[in-house]
Image (cartoon, helix red, strand yellow):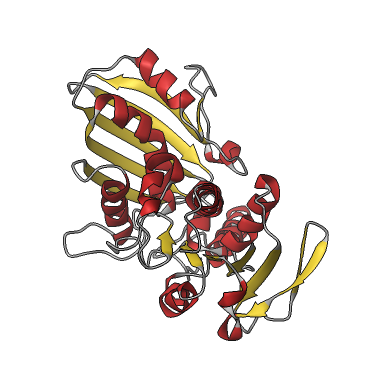
Amino acid sequence: MDIAIVGATGNVGRKLLEVLEKKELSFDNLHLVASSKSAGKKIIFKGKEYEISNLESFDFSKVKIAFFSAGKKISEKFAEIAAKSCLVIDNSSHYRMDPDVPLIVPQVNSEALKNIKKNIVSNPNCSTAQLVIALKPLHDLYTIKRIVVSTYQSVSGGGKAPMDELINQSNKFLENYLTPESGLHNIESKNFTKQIAFNAIPQIDLFSDDGYTKEELKMTNETKKILDEKIDLSATCVRVPTLVSHAESVNIEFEKPFTLEKVNSAIESAEGCKVVDLRDDGGYVTPVEAEGRFDTFVSRIREDKTIKNGLNLWIVSDNLLRGAALNAVEIAETLIKNNFYGK
């Protein structure tokens, strides 16, 4: 079986290569694909040199599975062309709410892979992916009625340019802080609506007419599609000055009573989840510690005493892994294991 990575030179493309190496997904040949700007460049993978192919001329009939990690516009233009020849696993938002395209987190709803109509499978938003993987075992036990979630999302969710901007702004801020006559607030923002260094921005993506941002609506709609249409969800998504990993403060209202002991056990037993909740100084996971880890970490597990059957959680995960590269590779593994691919 041959596979391709479209957007191989981007953040998620590079993470896909890391995950492929660690997960040891079985394939015969690997094709790295990108725009004409990157075509001809070389990437080393497992000690072998690979030359980047030009997306415009790449023949997708060479491969069985193509990972698309080059953004919405590229997926919109090329994914269905590729899907005529191979199965596409798309990391962009373009197909997520398409009723004919399954939106998959394998640990949550892999059964939906039995119904692939367009030869395309969609990967959810990174903030949605870590949320549903942690909540799935609890929903199975206690049935979730309502979720209120506030996110603390790293700049890597926007790509490499926002990461560079955070680093550059931080350096400039610190330089200005040491020499205040140059002015602390004379910092230009290109990828964010306001300065991101040493700041928090309560806007990710554009606003809709009802005041919610598209990122917040993605979390709502994708959670319903993946986990349960009956769940009510309200989200506030915030960009914070961390490079990698998203954190989420989650308040849940269940239909059934629970015990904290069973909640802890259910999450700890769930594939891809790990509980770190020592109720002591530092007895929780932060974004820095989650970076590069496959697990989704759950901490600060406690009863919400203001509502019946209420629970509070703190969820942290590497967004480039769980929300993108790792989830995409696990989709491929599930497809291969169940012989769904190539149909």
Q: Position of residue 166 (x, y in %)?
A: 55, 59
Residue 285 in sight in this render: yes
* Residue at the (64%, 68%) spot, across then down: 9
Q: Residue furthest right?
A: 47
- The quarter of the picture where residue 194 lies is bottom left
- In the rendered image, the quadrant that contains the C terminus is bottom left
* Residue at the (28%, 50%) spot, across then down: 225
Judge whether 64 appears above or below 272 on screen: below
Could you tell whether 65 is left or right of 128 in the image? right
Q: Position of residue 251 (x, y in %)?
A: 29, 32
Q: Position of residue 298 (x, y in %)?
A: 45, 30
- In the rendered image, the quadrant that contains the N terminus is bottom right
Seen from the viewer's position, the closer of residues 204 and 171 is 204
Seen from the viewer's position, the closer of residues 217 and 78 is 78
Residue 186 in sight in this render: no
Could you tell whether 339 is left or right of 14 in the image? left
Judge whether 17 appears above or below 8 on screen: above
Seen from the viewer's position, the closer of residues 316 and 231 is 231
* Residue at the (76%, 70%) spot, across then down: 50
* Residue at the (39%, 23%) spot, across then down: 301
Judge whether 309 appears above or below 31 on screen: above
Could you tell whether 317 is left or right of 111 in the image? right
